[in-house]
Image (cartoon, helix red, strand yellow):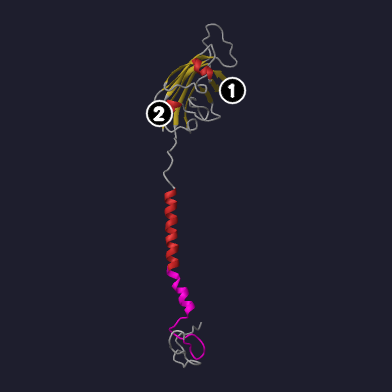
Amino acid sequence: MTREDPFIGADRAPVGPEPRVGRDGDTSADGGPTVGTSSPSTRSKRGLGKPAALALCLTGTVLLTVVLVSGGSSPSPVGPVIFHGNITVSGRVRANESFTDSTTATKVSSCSSAAAHGDRPSVGANTWLVPTPPANNTVELEIGTGKGAYRGPRRYPQVVLLQGNGAMEIGQESYDLTNSDATASMTVNSDGSGDVTFAHVPGDDDRPYPGWRGGISGTITWTCSS
């Protein structure tokens, strides 16, 4: 393919009159602008370039500063408070399960705070809910104090659970730790760890009798990390 040489014809005489160099504002014979000069409007447009660019740059800097300053300090982090638990059951049924609970104390900043004021403020102030396995687990728990009944780290007798809840489900059977034929207690330590111990808890289908020693017995233990 033939490529045109840009230098071919460069030495030919120009067609038409050459523009003459003159003073600003002068024009050549053909009426075009004089070579080497610029019209006032062109100079005016060029003159506005640097101030406009500087203003734009300063504006961007101010906006960036405002964004950085207005961000302020980050809010204090909340949690996560995570419980690591274990459930051991013997008697009518047997179970031995470990679990992690990262949902009970989502609104609490630390394990010590949970131990001091309760681990479930969304339910109510000074309320403790025993850490529980994920939903649809073989063993499900709903054990804890009533609203406002939690008084910080200590041992809580069965009557405190009676005011709250003491339900445990294992498979298809339900057990009530607050049943008068059973014994149960809960302990919470200052670091958020704790345990629930229970003995001879009858199931829904049981018919306890004087001197009852049936049902289930066991422990629920947990540690806390945050």
The C terminus lies in quadrant: top left
Q: Residue furthest top?
A: 210
Residue depicted at 45% across the width and 25% down the height = 86
Residue at x-position 47% and y-position 74%: 45
Q: Main secondary structure of the magenta part?
A: loop
- Give the residue number, with chain letter if any, for mark 1: 172
Closest to the camera, between mark 2 and mark 1, is 2
Horizontal side, residue 223 vs residue 15: left or right: left
> What stretch of residues is rendered in magenta?
26-50
Above or below — where is 18 with respect to 223? Answer: below
Q: Could you say which quadrant of the image residue 53 lies in?
A: bottom left
What's the residue type where badge 2 is placed? Ser
Q: Which residue is mark 2?
A: 112
Q: Is residue 52 magenta?
A: no
> Is 86 located above or below residue 16 in the figure?
above
Q: What's under tag 1, amino acid-wise?
A: Gln
Judged from the image, the secondary structure of the residue bearing numbered disc 1 is: loop
Could you say which is closer to the camera, residue 171 or residue 30? Answer: 30
Residue 161 position in % (x across, y down) = 51, 18
